[in-house]
Image (spheres, rainbow, N blue to C red):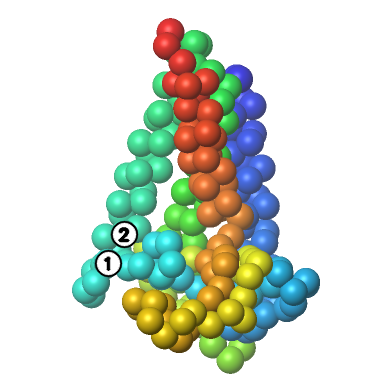
Amino acid sequence: MSLFKAYFLVILILLVDQFSKIYIKTNFILGEEVHVFNWFQIHFIENEGMAWGTKIPGEYGKLILTVFRLFAVTGIGYWLWDAIERKKSSNYLIVAIALILAGAFGNIIDSVFYGVIFDDSHQQVATLFAEKPYGTWLNGQVVDMFYFPFIKDYPMPEWVPYFGGREFIFFNAIFNVADMAISTGVGILIVFNKKAFHKE
């Protein structure tokens, strides 16, 4: 795969990711949800940390995470360029890296810019390029919206550690297009490992 095609894929995913996030931010109040099907909802949340809301504690935790993401994206971008320049890398590897790069970069855009271009989404629909933004540079929150509770309403038995008595939901993560791109890229590397990392 050529460098042009790889970066076209990255840009295409970024556009879809950012369009979906900006649409949600400017049309939904935080926590608002739309039931498309029983097993699929659009549910607007904001995530200031990593997967499942995990975050680095402390006053500068969010800043540290964003800076780390910037370095990670730089490394992934170089990995993609190097894989293509070596000519012998498989398309499986190149597509996987491109997907991971697009997803990582999509969430970084939220973290770097959203705090200074949107106002608060609490009890109101956010405004793009707001006069009073909700945050600062590098402290924006990532927008998530896709929710697929395929199985729910089955309380776990009380004797089950930690989950006992709680409603069982599968799949309970809320995510975005960028997250899907990252997961798909990682999935390709795992499932097609031998083809992605074939010996030259």
Q: Find out whether the residues at labels 1 and 2 contact each other: C-beta distance under 8 Å.
A: yes
The structure residue drawn at horizontal position 67% and vertical position 59%, both measured from the top left corner, is 19
Residue 104 against residue 169 in the figure, above or below: above
* Mark 1 secondary-structure assignment: loop
The structure residue drawn at horizontal position 52% and vertical position 40%, both measured from the top left corner, is 187
The structure residue drawn at horizontal position 38% and vertical position 81%, both measured from the top left corner, is 159
Q: Residue furthest bottom?
A: 123
Residue 10 against residue 28 in the figure, above or below: above
Q: Quadrant of residue 175?
A: bottom right
- Residue 165 at least partly seen: yes
Q: Quadrant of residue 30?
A: bottom right
Residue highlighted by disc 2: 65
Residue highlighted by disc 1: 56
Cα separation between marks 1 and 2: 7 Å
Q: Amino acid at mark 2?
A: Leu
Q: Amino acid at mark 1?
A: Ile
- Residue 116 at least partly seen: no
Name the mark on residue 33.
Answer: none
The answer to whether residue 123 is left or right of residue 193 is right
First-in-chain label (1 vs 2): 1
Q: Position of residue 162 (x, y in %)?
A: 35, 78
The structure residue drawn at horizontal position 31% and vertical position 59%, both measured from the top left corner, is 65
Q: Position of residue 73 (x, y in %)?
A: 40, 43
Tell me the mark number nearer the camera, choosing from 1 and 2. Answer: 1
